[in-house]
Amino acid sequence: MSNKPSLQLRALAALCCLAAASAIAQPTFGNPSPTAGSSTSQQANAAADAAAYQEVAYVNKAKRGPALVVIPGEVKSNNASFVQKFGPNNIADFGELELSQANFPVLERANLGNLLQEVSLAYNLGDAQAARKTMQVGKLKTTQWIVKFDILKAEQIAENKKGFDGRAIGGLMSMLGGGSLGGSAAGHITGSVQTQESAGVWLIGMRYKIMDANTTEQVAQGYKELKMEVGANATSVMGVSQQAKGGVGLDTMVQRLVQTTVWEIDSKYK
C-alpha cells in the first residue's frame, strides 16, 4: 500500500497547525521612527521596556477569591503635581484590573451606576445599616468584600546633581602650554567638555483596606512603599552631544503599588 496519502495528511496537518499558531500569535507592530535601529533608539527602547507593564504571577491565582467591589479611595498626599495627575478613580481602575487578574470576581464600578456613591459613603462612614440596604440590590447581593486603595504618601525625598565644565581647566592647559600648538589644541578640546547628571528619588506609599460587605467591619489592611527614580544626563565634547532622560512615571508607580498590594491580598487573605 502506498504511503502517499499518509504523507499528504501529515503535511496538511502541519499546515493547519502553522495556520492556527499564526492566528493566535501576539500582534506585532513596526517602528516608523526615522531613528529606528540606531543606538539612540535602542537605548531609549531599553529604558521603556524596563518601565513597561508586566503581569504579576499571583501565587493563588488558581483559587477563586471572594466576590468584591473596589470603591474609590483617597489621595492624601500634599504634593500638588501628584494630586493634579491622579484621582481616586484612576487608582480604583488599576485595582479592578489587577484583582481580576488574581481571579477575584470583581463587580466593576461602571455597572453600579448611581449606587456607587451610596456604596462608597456607607463603607467610608462604617454605616452597617446603609451598607446592608445597598447590598440587597441586584448583583451586589453576592458581594463579600469591599476593597479600597489609598495613596498616603507621594513626595520627592532626594535629589542629586553633578557636572563638569572643562572651560577653566582648558584655559589653564593653554596657558601652561606656553602658546604651543599642542598645548592650545589640548586646552581647546578640554574646554569643550561639558557633562551634567541629575537624579531625583520619590517615595510613594499605598494603603489597602478590605471591609466585610455586610457589616462594614475591617477584614484586613496593609501598607506598601516603592521608590521612583527619575534621572537625566548630558555630555558634550567638541560640539558632539548626547542626552538621556528617563525613569518610571507616576502612572507606572501607582500600578506597581496596586500590583504589590494585590499580591499580598491574594497570598494572605484568599
Image (cartoon, helix red, strand yellow):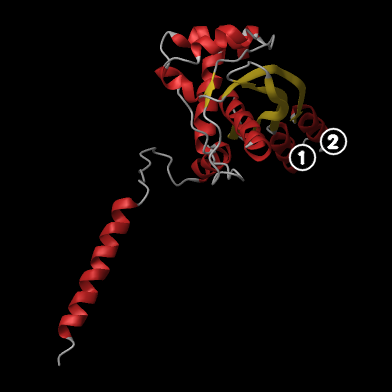
Q: Quadrant of residue 6?
A: bottom left
Residue at 50%, 11% in the rendered image: 134
At label 2, counting other C-alpha atoms closer than 10 Å, the crowd grade (few under 14, some 14-19, many 20 or more) is few
Of callouts 2 and 1, the N-terminal one: 2
**Which residue sits furthest bottom?**
1
**Marker disc for residue 268:** none
- Residue contact between numbered discs 2 and 1, judged by CB atoms under 8 Å: yes
Q: Secondary structure at mark 2?
A: helix
Q: Secondary structure at mark 1?
A: helix
Identity of the amino acid at label 1?
Answer: Gly
List x then y, in percent, for residue 108. 45, 23
Query: Foreground residue, 113 or 139?
Result: 139
Residue at 58%, 41% in the rendered image: 50
217 vs 3, left or right, is right
In the rendered image, which residue does mark 2 sit on?
Answer: 176
Query: Foreground residue, 25 or 80?
Result: 25
The answer to whether residue 161 is visible is yes
Above or below, comparing residue 132 to residue 194 in the picture: above
Above or below, comparing residue 59 to residue 74 in the picture: below
Identity of the amino acid at label 2?
Answer: Leu
On-image quarter of the C terminus:
top right
**Marker disc for residue 183:** 1
List x then y, in percent, for residue 251. 56, 25
